Amino acid sequence: MEITWIIGNGFDLNCGLKSSYQDFIEKYWKKKAVASNQEKLEQAANKGGLLEVELWSDVEEEMGRITQVFATETIAEYETIFSEMLALLIDYLKIQEETISATNLVERNVAEFYNSVTGYQKRLAPTDQDKVPNHLGSENNTYNFISLNYTTLIDSFVDAAKGKYNPFARRGSYTDKVSGVFHIHGYADMEGAPIFGVGGKSQISNTDLATDHEFCELWIKESQNEIAGNHRTSEFKSLVNRTNVFVLYGCSLGVTDEYLLCEIGRRMKQNTSVVIVILDYELPSRTAPDRAPFVRRRREVIDTFIRRANISESNREIYEKRIVVASSKTYFKFLKDNSGGTNG
């Protein structure tokens, strides 16, 4: 059985990295070297619209909306603004990542990472455990990791766990293994710029640009991988088609990653035993006296996933039984140092 973890920015934030969009714009908007482009960007974003969003997925969605204030003949200006923004982001993340290196991954944190990954099912509520195939101890398992981040912090944890636990897990005659981390959007130190943009033509508000082949190749994520000359999109699809259980951690389920979630939805349609576990940071306690907030938030997450995964409402009940929403706070409970980073 193959269990695939999809890791979003919530993982880096949990480790203490200042990798949120709000952290970044504190640097971007104060950098005098880009003052002219900053003014153009603020004007295009309705006098600061980009300053108000919180998630990276919101930023990418806003990129699609902003196209409506550009004409085809002025699109070079748009490209300059966001190319510059991406270059600054890469530099910023490199500095942030240096604050938490693999040498700072203390034994306790590596063990917690390992236990969260291999024992994810046991950390779910009993009724949620019933929805997940009981594969622990009954067959050989492979743990995969797909990162949506531009950092390689998750790689450091995976490598440390592989070094500490070899084989990755052994249960009687069954042996588990772990694959490397697959960066669908690239990463900061990777040759060539990471993938940054919208998820599809429908997210480009400017109808002329939405039909402009060159523009779409440059700014639609799936096309960017092809332009970069890599096989990441096809490799992602191959990995999805092998997966039996998906575990999403620190992911916003944003519209610009819809093309990825559609692949997961397609896999769920092809194989009726495939389950998705969504670990949500904002999920309230299910054991509180007032359970209404938990019910509402869980419903919101399920609704968002079904919509993003292109699952028909007419088949909703069939798929909803295979979607588990649980709190992310019981996973990766790392020991932190005084600065907020992973303790070293």
Image (cartoon, rainbow, N blue to C red):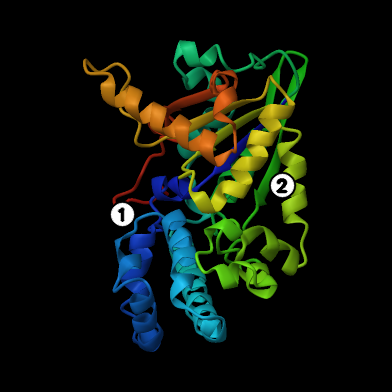
Q: As rendered, which of 304 and 323 lies closer to the eye?
A: 304
Tell me where residue 342 appears, x and y as whole percent. 41, 48
Q: Above or below — where is 236 with respect to 212?
A: above
Q: Above or below — where is 162 with respect to 19?
A: above
Q: Above or below — where is 279 with respect to 175?
A: below
Badge 2: residue crowd in 10 Å (few <14, some 14–19, many ≥20):
some
- Horizontal side of 299 relative to 226 (left or right) equals left
Q: As rendered, which of 47 and 184 lies closer to the eye?
A: 47
- Horizontal side of 167 relative to 152 (left or right) equals right
Amino acid type indicated by mark 1: Ser
Q: Nearer the viewer, mark 1 or mark 2?
A: 2
Q: Residue furthest left?
A: 289
* Residue at which label 2 appears: 236
Tell me where residue 244 appears, x and y as whole percent. 69, 27
Name the element at disc 2: helix
Task: Calculate the distance from the C-alpha at mark 1 to the C-alpha at mark 2.
Answer: 36 Å
Q: Residue at x 58, y 72 (%)?
A: 208
Q: Residue furthest front?
A: 207
Mark 1 or 2, nearer chain start: 2
Q: Residue at x 42, y 34 (%)?
A: 280
Amino acid type indicated by mark 2: Phe
Badge 1: residue crowd in 10 Å (few <14, some 14–19, many ≥20):
few
Residue 168 visible in this rendered orientation of the protein: no
- Horizontal side of 31 relative to 2 (left or right) equals left
Q: Residue at x 50, y 50 (%)?
A: 255
Residue 133 visible in this rendered orientation of the protein: yes
Tell me where residue 217 appears, x and y as whole percent. 68, 69
* Residue at which label 1 appears: 339
Tell me where residue 344 appears, x and y as whole percent. 42, 49
Quarter-of-image position of residue 65: bottom left
Name the element at disc 1: loop
